Image (tube, helix red, strand yellow):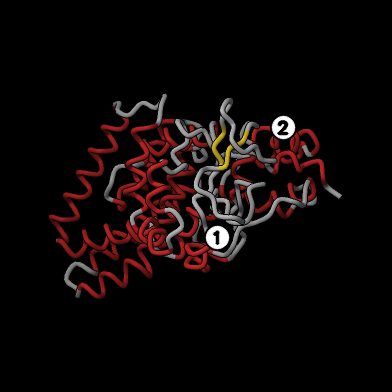
Amino acid sequence: MAKRTDFVYSEVSEPHRVRTKKILKQFPGLRNLIGKNPNTIFAIIGLVAFQVVLAWFLRDQSWWLVFGAAYLLGAFADHALFVMIHECAHQLLFKNRSANRWAGMFANMPQIFPSSISFERYHIKHHSFQGVHELDADLPNRWEAKLINNSFLGKALWLLFYPVFQIFRLSRLREIQTFDIWILANILVQVAFTAAIYYFMGWHALAFLLLSFSFSVGLHPLGARWIQEHYLTHSVEQETYSYYGGLNTVAFNVGYHNEHHDFPSIPWNKLPEIKKRPQSITKLCTTIRHGPSYSSAFCLIKKYRYLTVSYAESAVKSPLLTYQNQMLRCP
């Protein structure tokens, strides 16, 4: 892929809505996978308990042990909690919306920063308006892309401080309510939890939780997910990629990203069935490729460009054929 200095632009709509309709028309049996998974709450409880217990054990340990535990253990638990928050944002645990939000806030607690409710707002827009710069928080800012450019070191630092860059994207987003009673509740829960950790366990325990959060979304094998999902590492013909490697076991199948975007109402435990079934997306079209392994994180950093798809109705600079248009090219 040749180096570029701008986004790739497309004059077609985001691909997944069209794909979903075509897939369900041809394979209506996939509707049986749609539903809730209330058992996910037990995974949330276990992960939160794991982080709190580990923080307690590390309360009087050396800083080397705190850093090591955060990178090797805490980051995996925090990343899994991100996936749990993601499930709650899609209302995939309970029928009651409020119950899902409270579950998401509970999962958010060990991550220190209040983000569960805000994530729901931004993420649903990401699904509905994928690639629209004013509505999709997954797209980098233009200054962000120009600042990092194609520098290996710049990309590594970008991934290391990925949450910071995400914060700067929020000001450009439209049609999103930034504060209400739910966001206030999220903040108060986080303040109470953080204060309790500090009061009963001290700085080392709190540092462990902060580092676990930082590693889980930063320069870590799991952090490669932020590149794998939507960055155009292979070509400009496909802007969503799936990962089918072993880390899905500890990441609650979040790697099945094409499957999730096509069927956001299917819970995490049933996403692999879409691929396994004879009536599957891969049967519908074999041109959908999967992304590289998370274990290739540093190779990803070296390879990826700031190439993301930006959809526009006017002033289209470089129209591309997205993989939704390849659906009928099946053998």
The secondary structure type at the circle numbered 2 is: helix
| Amino acid identity at mark 2 | Lys
x and y, in percent, of residue 111 in the image: 31, 52
In the picture shown, does residue 105 fall above or below 226?
A: above
* Residue labelled with disc 2: 21
Q: Are marks 1 and 2 in contact (CB under 8 Å)?
A: no
Residue ranking furthest to the right: 331
Q: Residues within 10 Å of mark 2 (few under 14, many from 20)?
A: few
Q: Is 86 placed left or right of 162 in the picture?
A: right
| Amino acid identity at mark 1 | Asn
Q: Quadrant of the N terminus?
A: bottom right
x and y, in percent, of residue 278 in the image: 80, 51
- Residue 248 numbered tag: 1
150 or 168, which lies in front? 150
- Residue at position x 59%, y 35% from top? 317
Q: Say which of marks 1 and 2 sits in front.
A: 2
Asked if residue 216 can be seen in this view, the reply is: no
Number of labelled discs?
Answer: 2
- Residue at position x 20%, y 44% from top? 192
In the picture shown, does residue 235 fall above or below 298?
A: above
